[in-house]
Image (cartoon, rainbow, N blue to C red):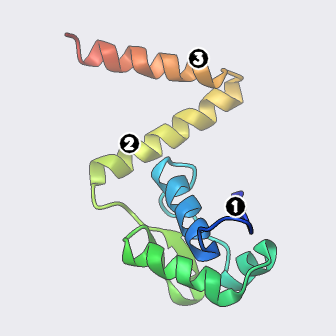
């Protein structure tokens, strides 16, 4: 997980953290169940105040993207749509297998597109 903070940006740091994590969750780079770094650890890694990262996590939790499980940390929450969650898990497995086999990303995506086209002719 790589988060970058642009200190020159007009966007507040908590919003930069929230937005980047939300994008990573939305596009599957952080699949359901992934444990996020502890607030203190991420704050130290990014050179931010603990309250800044805590606010980003709170906003992600309010949006339903993460769950805080007390001493077990903060994890990516299951989506509200079981079908999407199942597809996310399948996509994550597919991506890992493509990498393991050395299939380039553009070829792996082309295979998925072809499969989708075959499943939905017309």
Q: Is residue 122 left or right of residue 4?
A: left
Q: Is residue 46 left or right of residue 30?
A: right
Q: Residues within 10 Å of mark 1 (few under 14, many from 20)?
A: some
In the image, farthest residue toward the left: 122
Q: Is residue 60 left or right of residue 38?
A: left
Q: Helix, strand or loop at disc 3?
A: helix
Q: What residue is at 46 percent from the left and 52 percent from the top?
A: 26
Residue at the disc numbered 2:
87
The label on residue 107 is 3
In which image quadrant can residue 39 be found?
A: bottom right
User: Which of pointers 2 and 3 indicates the residue nearer the eye?
Assistant: 3
Q: How many angstroms separate mark 3 from mark 1 (CA)?
A: 28 Å
Q: How many angstroms separate mark 2 from mark 3 (CA)?
A: 19 Å
User: Which of pointers 3 and 1 indicates the residue nearer the eye?
Assistant: 1
Q: Helix, strand or loop at disc 1?
A: loop
Q: Nearer the viewer, residue 54 or 107?
A: 54
**Sooner in the amino-acid sequence: mark 3 or mark 1:** 1
Q: What residue is at 58 percent from the left and 81 percent from the top?
A: 73
**Sooner in the amino-acid sequence: mark 2 or mark 1:** 1
Q: What residue is at 37 percent from the left and 71 percent from the top?
A: 64
Q: Position of residue 81 (x, y in %)?
A: 27, 55
**Sooner in the amino-acid sequence: mark 2 or mark 3:** 2
- Disc tally is 3
Q: Tell me the quadrant of the picture where the N terminus can be found.
A: bottom right
Residue at the disc numbered 1:
3
Q: What residue is at 33 percent from the left and 48 percent from the top?
A: 84
Q: Position of residue 63 (x, y in %)?
A: 37, 71
């Amino acid at each position: 997980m790589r988060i970058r903070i642009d200190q020159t940006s007009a966007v507040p740091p908590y919003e930069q953290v929230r937005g980047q994590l939300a994008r990573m969750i939305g596009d599957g780079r952080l699949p359901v169940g992934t444990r996020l770094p502890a607030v203190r650890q991420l704050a130290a890694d990014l050179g931010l105040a603990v309250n800044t990262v805590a606010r980003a996590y709170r906003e992600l939790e309010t949006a339903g993207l993460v769950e805080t499980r007390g001493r077990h940390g903060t994890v990516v929450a299951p989506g509200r749509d079981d079908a999407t969650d199942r597809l996310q898990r399948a996509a994550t497995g597919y991506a890992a297998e493509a990498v393991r086999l050395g299939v380039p990303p553009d070829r792996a995506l082309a295979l998925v597109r072809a499969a989708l086209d075959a499943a939905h002719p017309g």
